[in-house]
Image (tube, rainbow, N blue to C red):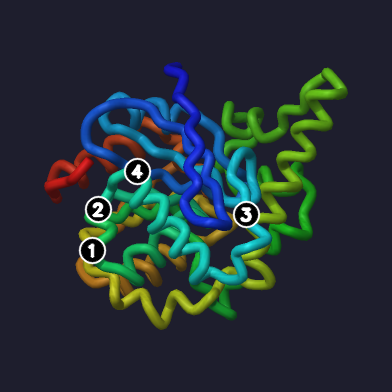
């Protein structure tokens, strides 16, 4: 697996983004979910085809300034500021879960900044008849059966991993707490901050990817996003749950590459 470089960008007076960068070619911005950013086989494979920019959410890892972000609107503006620092007038944006919600908001708020949108089991909508489990009231081990289809899979084992070294274990716990605290600012008490009133503004070519066995954000939400984003494409992947990019990496990569090839776009970098 290739090692990405880590860069720090002061995007405004209040917020700094740590960004992992790898690959070459057309730029692609990846926005991670509530569990934080890990350079995994999915991102590694993406970087074989694109220049991948993977920022940490403010308040996690090397990204700072979460306390200065009062609401989702502030957060979206900070990501636009990051695009400016990266020299990206418009970018392909891939977002998973919380990152999918942020990516959707970026595309809806300023239609010129997202050339092509790929959301993977995104948050952002809430249906009272199909409530989403409260991840902030769960222990990490309680999450596993909700986000992986096969509890014996490598993805499940990765989630259960606990370092033997006490210092490493403490560091992991601190990172997990930071990740969830940052995510809660934009997902709690329910993952609905008004996207449904803006989602119709998304005009970018859009691909929605979902694991058929997702028990965190159930499949009914895939159809809801698909119906609300005009012209969007929906790909449901078998034998996968919420962590579809780790469970079925090759198929997820294939879907993304096919979509980006079909919907060619010029880019500036």
Residues at marks 3 and 4, CA–CA distance in whole angstroms: 19 Å
- Along the viewing direction, whichever of 50 and 138 lies nearer the viewer: 50
* Structural crowding at the residue carrying mark 2, measured as other residues with C-alpha within 10 Å and reported as few (<14), some (14–19) or many (≥20): some
Quarter of the rendering occupied by the N terminus? top left
Residues at marks 2 and 4, CA–CA distance in whole angstroms: 9 Å
Numbered disc 1: secondary structure: loop
Residues at marks 2 and 1, CA–CA distance in whole angstroms: 8 Å
Which residue corresponds to mark 2? 89
- Along the viewing direction, whichever of 118 and 246 lies nearer the viewer: 118
User: Residue at (64%, 36%) from the top-left corner?
Assistant: 151
Label for residue 112? Answer: 1
Q: Nearer the viewer, mark 3 or mark 1?
A: 3
Q: Is residue 66 left or right of residue 2?
A: right
Residues at marks 4 and 1, CA–CA distance in whole angstroms: 16 Å
Numbered disc 4: secondary structure: helix
Numbered disc 3: secondary structure: loop
Name which of mark 2 and mark 1 comes first in the sequence.
2
Rendered location of residue 266, percent (x, y)? 12, 47
Rendered location of residue 163, percent (x, y)? 78, 23
Q: Quadrant of residue 174?
A: top right
* Structural crowding at the residue carrying mark 1, measured as other residues with C-alpha within 10 Å and reported as few (<14), some (14–19) or many (≥20): some
Residue 219, visible in the rendered structure: no
Which residue corresponds to mark 4? 86
Q: Quadrant of residue 204?
A: bottom left
Q: Name above or below for residue 39 compared with residue 111.
A: above
Which residue corresponds to mark 3? 65
Numbered disc 2: secondary structure: loop
Name which of mark 4 and mark 1 comes first in the sequence.
4
Q: Is residue 57 left or right of residue 43?
A: right
Q: Name above or below for residue 111 compared with residue 42.
A: below
Q: Name above or below for residue 174 compared with residue 105.
A: above
């Amino acid at each position: 697996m290739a090692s990405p470089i880590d860069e720090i960008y002061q995007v405004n007076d209040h917020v700094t983004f740590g960004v992992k960068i790898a690959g070459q070619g057309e730029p692609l911005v990846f926005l991670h979910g509530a569990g934080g950013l890990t350079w995994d086989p999915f991102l590694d494979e993406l970087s074989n085809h694109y220049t991948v920019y993977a920022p940490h959410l403010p308040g996690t890892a090397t990204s700072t300034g979460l306390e200065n972000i009062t609401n989702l609107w502030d957060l979206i503006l900070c990501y636009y500021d990051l695009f400016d620092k990266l020299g990206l007038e418009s970018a392909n944006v891939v977002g998973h879960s919380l990152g999918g919600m942020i990516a959707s908001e970026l595309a809806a708020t300023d239609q010129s900044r997202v050339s092509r949108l790929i959301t993977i089991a995104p948050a952002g909508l809430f249906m009272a008849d199909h409530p989403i489990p409260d991840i902030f009231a769960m222990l990490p081990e309680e999450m596993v059966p909700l986000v992986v289809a096969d509890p014996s899979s490598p993805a499940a084992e990765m989630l259960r991993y606990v370092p033997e070294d006490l210092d490493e274990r403490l560091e992991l716990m601190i990172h997990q707490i930071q990740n969830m605290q940052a995510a809660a600012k934009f997902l709690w008490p329910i993952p609905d901050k008004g996207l449904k009133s803006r989602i119709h503004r998304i005009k970018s070519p859009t691909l929605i990817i979902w694991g058929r066995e997702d028990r965190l954000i159930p499949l009914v939400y895939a159809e809801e996003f698909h119906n609300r984003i005009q012209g969007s494409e929906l790909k449901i992947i078998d034998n996968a749950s919420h962590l579809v990019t780790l469970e079925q990496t090759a198929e997820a990569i294939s879907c993304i590459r096919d979509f980006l090839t079909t919907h060619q776009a010029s880019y500036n970098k």
